[in-house]
């Protein structure tokens, strides 16, 4: 792990490896990034190509956006990322201009309609296409949100570029961000129109028209080409008219480009690697490309145990990050005796607020997650707890554990890895 490979460098290698094959037909490897949910929730006046331009720019910029004010890449590479196969560069420039000029409305679905929260911001502040190069810059106030998102969703360009409908593309990313919950929650028809950028189109003021020309086609395309399967539920308001929508979200088992959701490390693990082990973003990105969250968490537990249980006279470990990387490189694991010593004691009713993994209590952010999760669990009925465990068993967090430990039981909260993942899942459902 002496050499860090950023997603941008990896993307260039994949572009060369594709050798002219469209990104949507590139089956051998994933091409994607962790997109801040705040950015996903931005609604602006741009079309399908504009949406692809935004994702291409963010994919390129994310690894070094904090240090790099402007980005320059080959035009052919950018066109590949945006699935733009035309040689009409004037059209590409015009769509770039629409994105730059868009005043993105910051919309929060979970805020009351009369709440004053919100605002406007431009994501791409300038761009230039000249010769075989593309140059662009992103809004400085958003750079940290792009580089180190508090809440994010892994976006696969192989999947998002398959959409031919702007409505399907916009709706997919919003629902993909909510997949861990199993549904979108109830939203008003007006909120749905903000998501799909149809608020100014009078033809869709009537629900029947909106359903026929926007909602149903978007759902059909999402179910046909993406990694999620969506089912619509409606609710009537005063007067008997449809006033609210809810989208049930599950895995699409028929998708030929299914990605691994947990390629995006859970926020708690990212915080552990960043703060406790002091690894930089490029190193974490490399780990993210090579290993599952569960595999890295297992090595974190190993490092913590060995650091806390040094033999008499053994030299102090001054650089935990380097030590952790060496453990991962050598694929070291605790012995059975060490596992028994490190395992939590059995208790009749497990308290998930206790240390889910040794050392987590020293991390205030992880401790806050544990406390929040415990409070939520305490307030649940038996039926709600059972449902939470069922949803957790189907989540990407638990699937990551299953890939390395096939006999893992999602209801066994005595297991430190399972309990830590459940904490993160439960807290995230209420974020």
Image: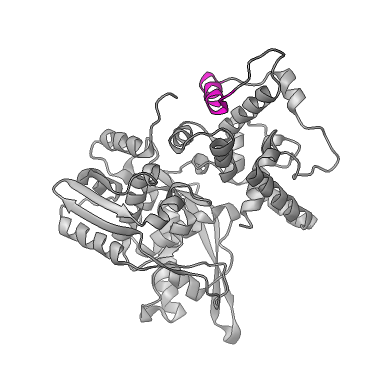
Part of the protein shown in magenta: 318-331
Q: Is residue 322 magenta?
A: yes
In the figure, residue 347 lies in which quadrant?
Answer: top right
- Asked whether, in this view, residue 152 is left or right of residue 3, the answer is right
Q: Is residue 191 above or below residue 279?
A: below
- Asked whether, in this view, residue 341 is left or right of residue 143, the answer is right
Using the image as rendered, state which of residue 329 and residue 304 is in the foreground.
304
Quadrant, the C terminus? bottom right
- Asked whether, in this view, residue 21 is left or right of residue 365, the answer is left
Q: State the scheme by which the image is colored.
A: one colour
Residue 205 percent location from the top left of the image: 42, 81
Residue 60 percent location from the top left of the image: 33, 45
In the figure, residue 213 lies in which quadrant?
Answer: bottom left
Quadrant, the N terminus? top left
Most extreme residue toward the left is: 131
Residue 314 percent location from the top left of the image: 66, 14
């Amino acid at each position: 792990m002496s050499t860090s490979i950023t997603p941008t460098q990896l993307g260039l290698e994949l572009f060369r490896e594709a050798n002219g094959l469209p990104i949507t037909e590139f089956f051998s490897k994933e091409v994607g990034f962790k997109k801040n949910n705040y950015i996903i929730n931005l609604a602006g006046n741009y079309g399908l190509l504009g949406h692809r331009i935004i994702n291409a720019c963010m994919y390129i910029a994310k690894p070094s956006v904090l240090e790099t004010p402007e980005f320059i890449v080959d035009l052919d590479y950018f066109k590949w990322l945006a699935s733009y196969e035309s040689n009409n560069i004037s059209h590409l420039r015009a769509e770039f201009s629409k994105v730059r000029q868009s005043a993105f409305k910051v919309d929060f679905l979970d805020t009351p309609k009369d709440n004053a929260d919100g605002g406007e911001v431009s994501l791409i502040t300038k761009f230039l296409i000249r010769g075989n190069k593309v140059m662009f810059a992103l809004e400085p106030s958003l750079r940290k949100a792009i580089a180190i998102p508090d809440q994010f969703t892994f976006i696969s360009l192989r999947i998002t570029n398959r959409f031919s409908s702007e409505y399907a593309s916009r709706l997919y990313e919003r629902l993909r961000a909510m997949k861990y919950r199993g549904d979108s929650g109830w939203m008003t028809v007006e909120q749905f129109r903000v998501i799909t950028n149809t608020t100014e189109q009078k033809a869709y003021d009537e629900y029947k028209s909106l359903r026929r020309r926007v909602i149903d086609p978007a759902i059909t395309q999402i179910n046909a080409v993406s990694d999620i399967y969506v089912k619509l539920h409606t609710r009537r308001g005063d007067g008997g008219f449809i006033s609210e929508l809810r989208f049930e979200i599950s895995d699409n088992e028929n998708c030929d480009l299914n990605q691994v959701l947990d390629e995006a490390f859970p926020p708690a693990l990212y915080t552990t690697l960043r703060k406790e082990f002091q690894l930089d973003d490029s190193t974490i990105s490399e780990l993210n490309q090579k290993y599952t969250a569960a595999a890295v968490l297992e090595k974190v537990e190993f490092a913590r145990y060995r650091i806390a249980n040094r033999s008499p006279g053994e030299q102090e470990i001054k650089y935990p990050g380097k030590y952790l990387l060496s453990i991962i490189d050598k694929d070291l694991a605790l012995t059975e005796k060490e596992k028994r010593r490190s395992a939590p004691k059995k208790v009749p009713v497990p308290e998930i607020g206790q240390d889910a993994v040794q050392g987590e209590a020293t991390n205030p952010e992880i401790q806050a997650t544990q406390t929040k999760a415990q409070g939520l669990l305490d307030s649940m009925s038996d039926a709600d707890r059972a449902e939470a465990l069922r949803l957790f068993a189907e989540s990407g967090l638990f699937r990551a554990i299953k890939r390395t430990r096939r006999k893992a039981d999602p209801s066994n909260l005595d297991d430190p890895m399972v309990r830590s993942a459940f904490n993160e899942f439960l807290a995230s459902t209420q974020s």
